[in-house]
């Protein structure tokens, strides 16, 4: 029984094998086979037939079914066929991305004649741009021929803006999230200083998530513009102080009040106040009050109030301390950031405000009588009062930091994008702009003299003492110079970059950092950093975009 079952099983397998082989013969290239009768049958699936649209841009056929055709002599009202091309690249890209209408599927390719197209274009990822086509011989549209292929490319050179943007994310949904654009046979040329900042020159930007291959094409950035100098502070001095009030004469009151202080209010709300003069009394005079604001540290002149007369004569108030001059601010440092509009550099630091001069101290008050002198019995017995200190000058304003020079970047790749520079391509940066010089600071205001102490009478009573003069305001700080602009073949942030060994990717000349305000040519004080010149530089992502 067992041998019959085995034989019957093998017969069934042979029958199935015959059926499978018969089906294979009917299907042509499909074959089902087994290494053993006990194994399951394995079926070979034939590869799909190649599309006539596939292949290298230089050799693949240019057919109406494969793409939309564009010529500088075309018409955007045309359907974009070989015999009726459209006129602008952007219109052709729209037709390739969405279809010509009448139910036709998107071709997702553009064939462009050699020649000049002065327009900014946005290319969704997954739409190819094959340029350098022969269009002067009827319906040929081949890559070789009389135009010489890459020697007579499609030139994309608008007078301003970013010549070529490759879009990703939601903007590339028509081509699928992982689709890649092939850019071949084109020369992308950015005008000098044509980016939105009015300084940088950037030829091609890949937005977040975009993917592109550059093949046998030139991507050329223009030269950038120098940064503007920082604004100088006002050329005239900051507000000056006020002369202190005079003290009262002797024998005019039993207790002659000291002179009232004067105040200078600066535009930032900080006050310089002279000290009160000391009161004049019959037997002793009061001390004067120190000026404000109190200086930092312990300078030799501190605006202290003078001593009132007692067994010794009164003393005058001290002059107030000068406000501190602000130091020159630092020059710009760092690489800057990349964003959807290009590159954002770093300005030089603004100069700080100079310190406010301290008010002078009030003079010490006198006394109305002593063993040798006294007020007449018919008069009040108080001595002369001290003069108030003069107020100090305000601090000068600082200069504004120098602007950064523009960058020259051929290809800029943003977060999550991917760029491949294939054989036969040139990606070249131009000259970066020099950073702007920092602005100069303002001179501080002058401090003014203190008031006179009250006068003595002819009988010989001692006069009171004068108030001290206010200190001068400090000079505002000179500003730092701006960052020099970069020159890069490729600048990327969080992007994938691949460069063929047969491609040329080079920078130009980076810009110099701007000088610090009021600095000599040979001095590097406050000078901004020089720009970066590299074939490829990877920028740091902004702190808000970095993973935790």
Image (cartoon, grey):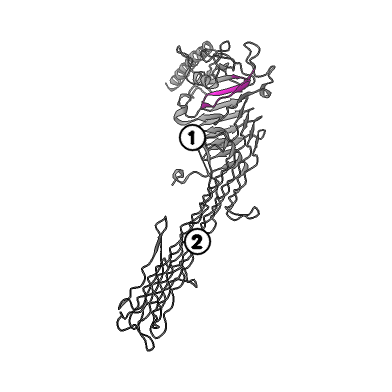
Q: Total marks drawn?
A: 2
> Is residue 49 visible from the viewing direction of this image?
no
What is the magenta range? Answer: 112-133
User: Which one is in front, 423 or 321?
Assistant: 321
Q: From mark 2 to mark 1, how far is it between C-alphas?
A: 50 Å
Look at the picture and state if 41 lies above or below 425. Answer: above
> Is residue 79 visible from the viewing direction of this image?
yes
What residue is rendered at 52% in x and 18% in y? 107
Q: Position of residue 241 (x, y in %)?
A: 44, 62
Of all residues, the one furthest to the bottom in this rendering is 371
Q: Give the numbered dot on residue 474.
A: 2
Secondary structure predominantly adopted by residues drawn in magenta: strand
Element under disc 2? loop
Element under disc 1? loop
Q: Is 114 within the magenta?
A: yes
Q: Position of residue 27 (x, y in %)?
A: 52, 12
Mark 2: give few (<14), some (14-19) or many (20+) Cα within 10 Å: many
Look at the picture and state if 108 lies above or below 246. Answer: above
Quarter residue 418 falls in: top right
Give the number of the mark in front: 2 or 1: 2
User: Which one is in front, 51 or 374?
Assistant: 374
- Ranked by sequence position, the earlier of labels 2 and 1 is 1
In the drawing, does residue 372 fall left or right of residue 233? left
Quarter residue 487 falls in: top right
Look at the picture and state if 371 lies above or below 534. Answer: below
- Residue of label 1: 208
User: Which one is in front, 363 or 55?
Assistant: 363
Q: Position of residue 50 (x, y in %)?
A: 57, 18
User: Which one is in front, 115 or 57?
Assistant: 115
């Amino acid at each position: 029984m067992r041998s019959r079952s085995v034989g019957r099983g093998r017969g069934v397998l042979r029958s199935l094998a015959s059926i499978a082989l018969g089906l294979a013969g009917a299907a042509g290239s499909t074959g089902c086979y087994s290494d053993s009768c006990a194994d399951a049958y394995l079926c070979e699936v034939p590869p799909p037939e190649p599309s006539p649209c596939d292949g290298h841009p230089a050799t693949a056929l240019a057919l109406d079914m494969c793409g939309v055709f564009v010529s500088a002599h075309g018409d955007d009202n045309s359907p974009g066929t070989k015999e009726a091309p459209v006129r602008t690249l952007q219109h052709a890209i729209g037709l390739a991305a969405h279809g010509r209408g009448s139910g036709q599927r998107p071709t997702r390719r553009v064939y462009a004649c050699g020649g000049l197209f002065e327009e900014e274009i946005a290319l969704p990822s997954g739409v190819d741009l094959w340029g350098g086509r022969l269009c002067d011989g009827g319906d040929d549209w081949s890559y070789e021929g009389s135009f010489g292929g890459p020697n007579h490319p499609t030139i994309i050179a608008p007078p301003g803006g970013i010549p070529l943007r490759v879009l990703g994310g939601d903007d590339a949904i028509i081509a699928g999230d992982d689709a890649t654009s092939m850019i071949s046979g084109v020369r992308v040329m950015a005008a000098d200083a044509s980016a939105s900042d009015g300084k940088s020159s950037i030829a091609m930007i890949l937005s977040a998530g975009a993917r592109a291959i550059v093949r046998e094409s030139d991507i050329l950035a223009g030269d950038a513009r120098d940064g503007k100098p920082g604004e100088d502070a006002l050329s005239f001095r900051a507000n000056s102080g006020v002369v202190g009030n005079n003290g009262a004469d002797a024998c005019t009151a039993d207790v002659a009040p000291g002179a009232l202080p004067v105040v200078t209010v600066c535009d930032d709300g900080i006050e310089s106040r002279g000290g009160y003069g000391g009161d004049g009394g019959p037997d002793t005079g009061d001390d004067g009050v120190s000026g404000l604001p109190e200086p930092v540290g312990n300078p030799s002149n501190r605006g202290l109030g003078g001593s009132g007369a007692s067994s010794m004569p009164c003393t005058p108030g001290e002059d107030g301390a000068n406000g501190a001059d602000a130091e020159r601010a630092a020059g710009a440092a760092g690489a800057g950031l990349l964003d959807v509009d290009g590159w954002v550099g770093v300005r030089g630091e603004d100069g700080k405000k100079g310190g406010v001069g301290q008010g002078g101290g009030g003079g010490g008050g006198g006394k109305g009588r002593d063993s040798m002198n006294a007020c007449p019995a018919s008069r009040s017995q108080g001595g002369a009062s001290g003069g108030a200190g003069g107020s100090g000058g305000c601090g000068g304003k600082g200069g504004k930091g120098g602007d950064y020079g523009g960058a020259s970047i051929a290809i800029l790749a943003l977060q999550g994008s991917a760029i491949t520079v294939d054989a036969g391509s040139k990606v070249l940066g131009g000259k970066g702009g020099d950073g702007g010089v920092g602005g100069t600071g303002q001179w501080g205001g002058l401090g003014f003299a203190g008031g006179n102490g009250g006068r003595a009478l002819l009988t010989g009573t001692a006069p009171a003492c004068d108030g001290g003069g206010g200190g001068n305001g400090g000079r505002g700080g000179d500003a730092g110079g701006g960052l020099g602009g970069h020159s890069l073949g490729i600048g990327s942030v969080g992007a994938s970059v691949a460069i063929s060994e047969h491609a040329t990717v080079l920078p130009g000349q980076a810009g110099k950092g701007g000088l610090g305000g009021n600095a000599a040519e040979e001095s590097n004080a406050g000078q901004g950093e020089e720009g970066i010149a590299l074939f490829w530089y990877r920028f740091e992502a902004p702190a808000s975009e970095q993973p935790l």
